[in-house]
Amino acid sequence: MKMTRNRVASLIVASLTLMQGGFVVAGLPVPATSDEPKRKTVSIELAVSFLDEVSLDWTRTRQCGTCHTNYAYLMARPSAPGYGSSEALKEIRGFFESRVEHWDDPDKGAKPRWDAEVIATAATLAIQDGSTTGKLHPMTRKALDRIWTLQREDGGFTWLKCGWPPLEHDDYYGAVFAALGVGLAPEGYASSESAVRGLARLKRYLRETPAPDLHHRTFLLWASLQIDGILGTEERVKIERDLRSLQREDGGWSLPSLGEWKRRDGSPNPKDAPSDGYATGLVVYVLRQGGVASNDPALRKAVDWLRTNQRESGRWFTRSVNNDKAHYIANAGTGFAIMALASCR
């Protein structure tokens, strides 16, 4: 990839900042590390600025969407409307709307790269529409309608399987994320003529296909709160009970405890791994959506953990369950931490 003169200059500044031991590199936080110092007081403003910067940089330099950064960003950003740069949000949202608008252009580069791009874009835009305007944007509707053309006979979808758990790893996540997006889409999209038949097949897939791990069951619980007929009451209670049983003494949850993923080198992820932002934020947020009170003792301990484990860069650290080259999952974890704190006021 060719680099502009400005980009080269940015990398030089980055190197100098790193050598000085700073936590901001050319306007961006340095790569996530477990030994980054923790803040003494939590700052939502700093967390939002971190997400604005890292997501904007990803969108501009990679020109793609990814579950661990800018898709997660669009889901989380409405939880902190009074903070950060509205221009960053506008640009990132505009990028995805433009992708949808031009998917059918003759230019090969305009085509969706994978089925997963269509599903993730549609679901994410729908979730954001539901938590902001309450109106289904025309590009969101176009993307949602398109996912049904990609649906398999069994009701599921073909998802990215890059060996990057838990998000880009198996077909089940694509199905449950699609269900979440359709369920949270505003203006009754789930009951529209465009969605009814496809959603019925998707619900059948989710009922008949066991979720492979507790991480995906957590998303299933979240989706079931929006769409009837996916989980019964007893199943929801069991997922909540299983999640509560994994809360650590310090009040947080750890991502490795939610699945059986092996690392890129074949080694297992330790079940006694420290609490992290992704698992703690996700569990707290989904339990709150399920009606667990914010003053529930388990959630109060979890909120205390979130308030005392933000890093100097503004992020909450989460170790990758794939490899230690780059802990991009910390970006999504920061988004869920913001959502969790907002949901608990």
Image (cartoon, rainbow, N blue to C red):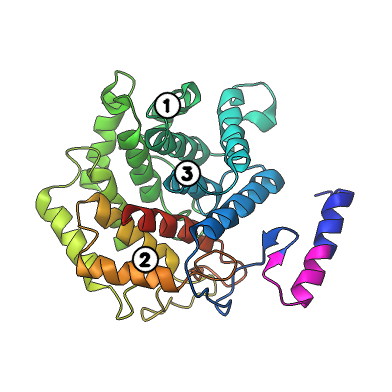
Residue at mark 2 to residue at mark 3: CA–CA distance: 22 Å
Relative to residue 136, is residue 215 depicted above or below?
Answer: below
Relative to residue 145, is residue 177 depicted above or below?
Answer: below
* Residue drawn 61% across the image and 35% down it: 95
Quadrant where the C terminus is found in the figure: bottom left
| Residue where numbered disc 2 is placed | 280
Which residue type carries mark 3? Pro
Disc 1, disc 3: CB below 8 Å? no
Question: In screen coordinates, is 230 left or right of 234?
Answer: right
Mark 2, Cα crowd under 10 Å, few <14 / some 14-19 / many 20+, is many
Relative to residue 272, is residue 200 depicted above or below?
Answer: above
- Whether residue 54 is visible to the viewer of this picture, yes or no, is yes
Residue at mark 1 to residue at mark 3: CA–CA distance: 34 Å
Toward the top, the furthest residue is: 193
Q: Nearer the viewer, mark 1 or mark 3?
A: 3
Which of the pair 172/311 is nearer the observer?
311
Disc 2, disc 3: CB below 8 Å? no
| Residue where numbered disc 1 is placed | 149
Occupied quadrant, residue 154: top left
| Residue where numbered disc 3 is placed | 81
Q: Nearer the viewer, mark 2 or mark 3?
A: 3
Q: Could you tell me which secondary element the residue under label 2 belongs to?
A: helix
* Residue drawn 56% across the image and 66% down it: 327
Occupied quadrant, residue 91: top right
